[in-house]
Image (cartoon, rainbow, N blue to C red):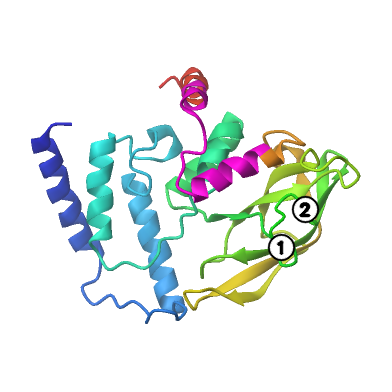
Amino acid sequence: MATNDLDVLRIQVRAWLDSNIPPDLKLPPRGTDMSEELIDWTLFFRRKLGSQGWLAPDWPLHFGGGGYTFQAAQVIREELKRRPLPPLPLDNMWLTPLRAFGTEEQKARWLSRTLRGEITVVHAISEPRGGSDLAGQNTLAIKDGDGYMVTGEKGYIHGPFKPDFLFMLVNTDPDGPKYENLSTVIMDVDTDGVTFKKGSKTLMGTTDSNAIMEKVWVSADRIVGGEGNGWEVAQCMIDVERGGPGVTAEQREAIEQREREHWGA
């Protein structure tokens, strides 16, 4: 995109933000939780951003992104950062892992709706009593018919926004070898047996939450990357959390080739 085109885009983004952000929008003092009114407005604003493709401006259009070049996406991000906005509920730790390991059907189901701002999906890989051993997962997902029965507790779920889905690391083979006994599953929180409770205070002063699962049935098509591949998915998530790409250049090329073959783009 030429410099003049980027300048035009910047003007358009600024005008849109001026029209869609109330001039009297007030953020809570640092270290305090958001009000229900602000939470509702933030979810509404997220959906509007998603309809523009601006939640993930450089992601493909078929995933709800904007399809912009890297330079154009940077313009959009810069203009958003200039505004005093509350944190938008978009957990990016699971996006690349799902794109790398998920089926095209899973991507269409969860990536697209997330990047359009329609649903909230958060990662849940830590446990209240898990310590630093990420592979020592106590949340069990035991095979049950054509699905799994999940029981356990996940902690440190950040933010004031109740998630619609959890992207979870679970133990699918408690008697199996360490690392090979882990899988990743996407669970709908509006399911019998799922409850939330207040967790710990963060360093920022806000409150985390814990998710408790008691015999929650999850269908097998919610497993991401296949049973027993959860540790590899988790390593991708950790790399993203640390600011890395999550995948190698060769892996990204292979992922994009599969997507082109499926989506025709």
**Residue extending furthest right?**
175
Q: Position of residue 79 (x, y in %)?
A: 22, 55
Q: Secondary structure of the magenta portion, mostly?
A: helix
Pick the front one: 49 or 152: 152
| First in sequence: mark 2 vs mark 1 | 1
The reply to whether the magenta stretch includes residue 243 is yes
Give the residue number, with chain letter if any, for mark 2.
Answer: 136
Where is residue 17, by image quadrant? bottom left
Tag 2 secondary structure? loop
Task: Say whether residue 187 is left or right of residue 10.
Answer: right
Q: Mark 2 touching mark 1, by CB under 8 A?
A: yes
Report the span colored magenta.
232-254
The crowding category of the residue bearing disc 1, from other C-alpha atoms within 10 Å (few below 14, some 14 to 19, many at least 20), is few
Q: Position of residue 216 (x, y in %)?
A: 79, 56
Q: Is residue 94 above or below residue 224?
A: below
Tag 1 secondary structure? loop
Pick the front one: 250 or 149: 250
The reply to whether the magenta stretch includes residue 240 is yes
Give the residue number, with chain letter if any, for mark 1.
Answer: 131
Screen quadrant of the C terminus: top left
